Image: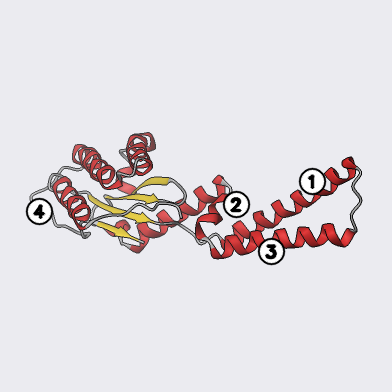
Amino acid sequence: MVKTLKFSPDDRSRIAAAVHNAESATSGEIFAVFARRSDGYRFVSGFFALLLSLVLGLILSALLAVLGVALPAFAVEGAQAIGAAALLAAVWLWEDARMLFVPKRIAAERAHRQALAQFLAHGIHITAGRTGVLLYVSEAEHYAEVVADAAINEKVGEETWSEIVTTLTEAAREDRLAEGFVAAVEKTGVILTRHFPAGETNPNEIPDGIVEI
């Protein structure tokens, strides 16, 4: 079983406190989401597992021909069918095995899609000043993204968020993601304060903390 990242109650409290402190100096809103995976990948991984079994079957047939080994067609086809069934069963029943058969491009696309879905689901797009920011990490895909709302995108370029994405991905890889989220929140707060300082009234429009899905 692949080791999974976990947050203790103290970790969650530290992240919530970091969000609260960062937002105290800005009209912006920061929200954090951690996903175990961004998609079930059963059909995607099943397709590529089946494709792999077909390729391996062809390689086996070619190898037997080169070695001069003659086997009945039903034996080769039977072995291929058993291999395909075993691979399909593995990716269907064992979640950790699925990612082995998912192309990185598809994994990144699904993770990006889920990040946008979380941005909308938690109302980050309807803050008064359109100054919401989502910090999103998806463990299975080794993926992190910062999704910012319209007003922020007018002033902050995509390259600005790359350092924060790196902070999150490195922290996840080193099994210190809570620390990574705290650092990412603090850096995001500095950026938001620079462009969107807090006014006389500074309501908290989105709950502080981290959501795990």
Disc 4 designates what residue? 201
Give, as a three-letter code, the residue at label 2: Phe
Please rate how many residues cluster around mark 2, counting C-alpha atoms within 10 Å: few if below 14, some from 14 to 19, many from 20: many
The answer to which of 24 and 154 lies nearer the viewer is: 24
Q: Is residue 29 left or right of residue 92?
A: left
| Disc on the earlier residue, 1 or 4 | 1
| Disc on the earlier residue, 2 or 3 | 3
Q: Residue at x 80, y 62 (%)?
A: 78
Q: Secondary structure at mark 4?
A: loop
The answer to which of 16 and 112 lies nearer the viewer is: 16
| Disc on the earlier residue, 2 or 4 | 2
| Disc on the earlier residue, 2 or 1 | 1
Q: How many angstroms separate mark 2 from mark 1 (CA)?
A: 19 Å
Q: Secondary structure at mark 3?
A: helix
The percent position of residue 202, horizontal first and vertical second, equals: 12, 53
Disc 3 designates what residue? 85
The percent position of residue 28, horizontal first and vertical second, equals: 22, 49
Please rate how many residues cluster around mark 3, counting C-alpha atoms within 10 Å: few if below 14, some from 14 to 19, many from 20: some
Disc 2 designates what residue? 101
Mark closer to the observer (4, 3):
3
| Disc on the earlier residue, 1 or 3 | 1
Please rate how many residues cluster around mark 1, counting C-alpha atoms within 10 Å: few if below 14, some from 14 to 19, many from 20: few
| Disc on the earlier residue, 4 or 3 | 3
The answer to which of 185 and 212 lies nearer the viewer is: 212
Q: How many marks?
A: 4
Q: How many angstroms separate mark 2 from mark 3 (CA)?
A: 15 Å
Q: Secondary structure at mark 1?
A: helix
Q: How many angstroms separate mark 1 from mark 3 (CA)?
A: 18 Å
The percent position of residue 79, horizontal first and vertical second, equals: 77, 59
Give, as a three-letter code, the residue at label 1: Ile
Looking at the figure, which quarter contains the C terminus?
bottom left
Picture disc at residue 59: 1
